[in-house]
Image (tube, rainbow, N blue to C red):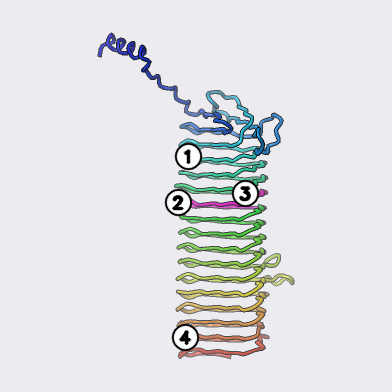
């Protein structure tokens, strides 16, 4: 086409109002910030961006529930612009935030931010970091890690709305320190998930659903008011709770890998129920500096491979592991080990059942409120009770070579029943 013909066509399109002029694209490190009614929408660019969100210095109470909403300031870091400018932008009457990050490495900082409305954040494709420091947030938070390795951090903040964090294709990290929360839900992604809470108080429920990867959950000085539900993923996972107060029921489910579960100097208000999956797993209750307590039932169910359950109380007076009602340890599959050292107090019954291979049961210094029952299968098993007391005792075993020994001051005041199989057995 000649230049004359092109100009002729352009003239006709202009005359008909049909010529569309493409909008100028955002600069690569620019952030689009705009309002839609009472919603503030923030959208990242194609290259890395970094910005902070804080309370507008205008007079503002940050309640988010009134007719005026809250005041918000968005401040770009060096190298990032907002609507093409390096200057901060301030908004009043904001009732919700919607943040959508781009495909590269982005950083979002909520700093000294008081906000009562809902926050929805999608991290995008890059390896992103989102942190909350000194914040007071009253609305619902929905946070999406999306693809890439993403980190969400809370420090010295109070969150009174529900937190929902969902990972994507990549690793997910959630850290919280000196923070108060209510109902909190974390769903892992395809990679490794790490949840680390230190000095955290949760008024409501906690649900951790970890899907894939080798995941780590670490609670230190965590107080949870209602139920705690933890589902570990398909990899090799670690769960630890130290000096925690989990005031309701705790339910923990293992994955297909080798899982390590440990509680130390903590209190579970009601029942502790742990179901371990396949893989070589370990489960431990430890009293190291203070009592380790389970308010009601302790129920541990093993997987098809060799599992170890260990209960330990230190030698210092006052150190004890306590179970308010009954304790039931059911292991299966390969050779398993159940040991207790130090002072263990069980309110009613202590029941153990083993798998089809060799099981080792060693209890030292256990006070059983009522009955002890051990049901062993066809392997070569051994049961040793040292300095233990209870009412009735019943031990049964299969066709292997079994050994049962009562040592020290072990004494049961009621009926004693020991039925071993056809192997070469030793009993009291």
**Which residue carries the number 2 mark?**
190
Distance from label 2 to label 3 (Cα)? 22 Å
User: Who comes first in sequence, dot 3 or dot 4?
Assistant: 3
Quadrant of image for the N terminus: top left
**Which residue carries the number 4 mark?**
398
Residue projecting furthest to the right: 317
Residue closest to the eye, 131 or 89: 89
> Which residue corresponds to the image point at 66% horizontal and 75% vertical from the top-left?
344
User: Who comes first in sequence, dot 2 or dot 1?
Assistant: 1
Q: Considering the numbered disc 4 on the image, is that residue within a helix, a strand or a loop?
A: loop
Distance from label 4 to label 2 (Cα)? 43 Å
> Which residue corresponds to the image point at 30% horizontal and 10% vertical from the top-left?
8
Q: Considering the numbered disc 1 on the image, is that residue within a helix, a strand or a loop?
A: loop
User: Who comes first in sequence, dot 1 or dot 4?
Assistant: 1
Distance from label 3 to label 1 (Cα)? 22 Å
Q: Residues within 10 Å of mark 1 (few under 14, many from 20)?
A: many
Question: Is 374 colored magenta in this rendering?
Answer: no
Q: Are marks 4 and 2 in contact (CB under 8 Å)?
A: no
Q: Which residues are magenta?
A: 176-199
Image: 284 above or below 182: below
Image: 297 above or below 216: below
Image: 158 above or below 79: below
Residue 124's disc is 1
């Amino acid at each position: 086409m000649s230049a004359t013909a092109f100009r002729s066509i352009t003239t006709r399109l202009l005359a008909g109002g049909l010529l569309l002029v493409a909008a100028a694209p955002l600069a690569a490190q620019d952030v689009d910030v705009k309002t839609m009614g009472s919603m503030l929408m923030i959208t990242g660019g194609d290259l890395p961006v970094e910005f902070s969100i804080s309370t507008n210095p205008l007079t503002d109470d940050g309640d988010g529930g009134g007719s005026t909403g809250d005041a918000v300031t968005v401040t770009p870091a060096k190298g990032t612009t907002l609507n093409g400018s390096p200057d901060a932008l301030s908004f009043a009457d904001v009732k919700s935030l919607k943040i959508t990050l781009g495909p590269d490495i982005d950083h979002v900082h909520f700093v000294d931010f008081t906000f009562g409305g809902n926050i929805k954040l999608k991290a995008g494709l890059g390896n992103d970091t989102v942190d909350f420091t000194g914040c007071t947030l009253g609305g619902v938070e929905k946070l999406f890690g999306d693809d890439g390795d993403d980190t969400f951090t809370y420090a010295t903040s109070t969150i009174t709305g529900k937190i929902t964090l969902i990972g994507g294709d990549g690793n997910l990290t959630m850290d919280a320190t000196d923070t108060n929360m209510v109902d909190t839900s974390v769903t892992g992604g395809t990679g490794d998930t790490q949840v680390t809470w230190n000095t955290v108080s949760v008024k409501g429920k906690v649900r951790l659903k970890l899907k894939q990867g080798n995941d780590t959950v670490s609670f230190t000085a965590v107080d949870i008011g209602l139920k705690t539900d933890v589902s570990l993923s398909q990899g090799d996972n670690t769960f630890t709770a130290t000096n925690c107060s989990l005031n309701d029921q705790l339910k923990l489910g293992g994955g297909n890998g080798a899982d390590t579960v440990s509680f130390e100097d903590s209190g579970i208000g009601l029942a502790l129920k742990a179901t371990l999956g396949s893989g070589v797993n370990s489960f431990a209750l430890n009293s190291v500096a203070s009592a380790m307590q389970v308010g009601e039932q302790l129920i541990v169910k093993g997987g098809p491979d060799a599992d170890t359950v260990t209960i330990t109380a230190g030698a210092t007076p006052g150190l004890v592991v306590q179970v308010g009602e009954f304790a039931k340890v059911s292991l299966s599959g390969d050779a398993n080990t159940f040991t207790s050292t130090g002072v263990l107090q069980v309110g009613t019954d202590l029941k153990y059942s083993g798998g089809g291979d060799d099981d080792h049961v060693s209890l030292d210094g256990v006070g059983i409120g009522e009955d002890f029952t051990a049901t062993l299968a066809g392997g070569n098993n051994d049961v040793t009770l040292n300095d233990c007391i209870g009412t009735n005792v019943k031990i049964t075993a299969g066709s292997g070579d079994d050994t049962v020994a009562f040592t020290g001051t072990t004494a049961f005041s009621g009926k004693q029943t020991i039925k071993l199989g056809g192997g070469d057995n030793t009993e009291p």
